[in-house]
Amino acid sequence: MLFSPPCEHAIRALIYLASQTSESPVSVAIIAKNSDVPSQFLAKILLQLKNHRIVRSMKGPGGGYLLAKSPGDIRLIDISSVFDSPQKTQTQCILGLEICMDSHPCPLHHEWQRFRANLAVQFHEITLSDLRDKLAEKRFYIANQREG
């Protein structure tokens, strides 16, 4: 598992918010239902995202959450760093060994280093709008496969 469960939930919820064409706030219950995230966890996740200025909230009747900036300005690293420690991924042995370093590498150490470096670049390049668009393409493909 690359992302922690809270991070996965956040990504799915943010993709849903990025797919909204209206400027109206969306309630936690609606976001939870449409992104398949348990609502009791989502409220806490959205609060963390609000504290990191990824979403903003509006209170009262008709209140809810909106993206704080354009989906093209929110990068995967912005989301993942709220929930997951980039340092842990950079230092943790892929095989779970306690001692794994350049001077005493595990069998996958050097391959994992290259993979992590590429992954870090991707996390800085992939935006929320990229994720939204790719998910829309996937849903379109699946819908067409069912019809055909």
Image (cartoon, rainbow, N blue to C red):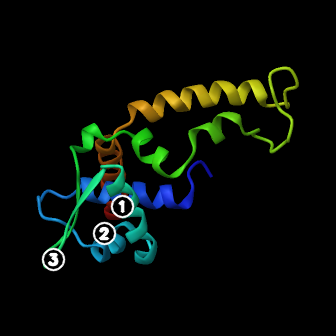
Residue 7 location (% of width, % of height): 49, 55
* Residue at the image position 40 percent from the left and 58 percent from the top: 48
Q: Which mark is residue 13?
A: 1
Residue type highlighted by circle 1: Ala
Residue lying at the far front in this picture: please name it: 51
The answer to whether residue 50 of the structure is visible from this angle is: yes
In the rendered structure, find residue 60 and report the number of the disc placed on it.
3
Residue 26 placement, left or right of 139: left
Query: How dense is the environment of label 2, judged by Cα within 10 Å: few (below 14), some, or many (20 and up)?
Result: many
| Residue at x 28%, y 74% (from the top left corner) | 30
Q: Between marks 3 and 2, how big is the CA–CA gap?
A: 17 Å
Rendered view: 112 above or below 52: above
Q: Are marks 2 and 1 in contact (CB under 8 Å)?
A: yes
Image-based side of 84 in relation to 69, left or right: right
Q: Which mark is residue 31?
A: 2
The secondary structure type at the circle numbered 1 is: helix
Indicate whether 46 appears above or below 88.
below
- Say which element carries label 2: helix
Quadrant for the C terminus, please.
bottom left
Question: Residue sitting at 18 percent across and 72 percent down?
Answer: 59
Q: Are marks 1 and 3 in contact (CB under 8 Å)?
A: no
